[in-house]
Image: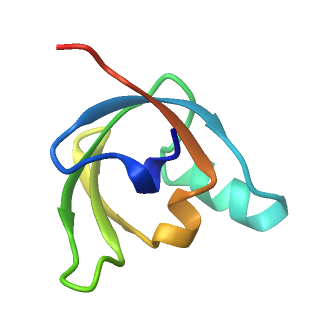
Amino acid sequence: MSLDALPLNQSAVITAVGGEGALRCRLLDMGLIPKTTVVVEKVAPLGDPLELRVRGYSLSLRKEDARNISVEVKNA
């Protein structure tokens, strides 16, 4: 599943980061790298952007960019 489809407060592990060129480098620089745990904490009223918890900090990310990140839901 892609990160933009992850339900609110659901924990998942990043499996792959897509995109090309500068976009992919920017996502990786923000700490969105494979095997990292990520949680969708909030969603803006109109659905975009998403607020994520990754590596101990909050990160806002547009849904368009979140579609480039594949995740696997963690079983609790």
- Residue at x 50%, y 22% (from the top left corner): 35
Residue found at the very far right of the displayed protein:
21
Quarter of the image for the C terminus: give it.
top left
Q: How is the image coloured?
A: rainbow
Q: Quadrant of residue 24?
A: bottom right
Q: Is 38 above or below relative to 25? A: above
Position in image of residue 16 (x %, y %): 64, 34
- Residue at x 35%, y 75% (from the top left corner): 49
Residue found at the very far bottom of the displayed protein:
46
User: Could you tell whether 14 is left or right of 20 in the image?
Assistant: left
User: Could you tell whether 42 is left or right of 21 in the image?
Assistant: left
Q: Quadrant of residue 60?
A: bottom left
Q: Is 12 above or below relative to 70? A: above
Position in image of residue 42 (x %, y %): 17, 63
- Residue at x 35%, y 78% (from the top left corner): 48
Q: Nearer the viewer, residue 31 or 16?
A: 16
Position in image of residue 75 (x %, y %): 25, 14
User: Could you tell whether 5 is left or right of 44 in the image?
Assistant: right
Position in image of residue 31 (x %, y %): 48, 44
Q: How many marks?
A: 0
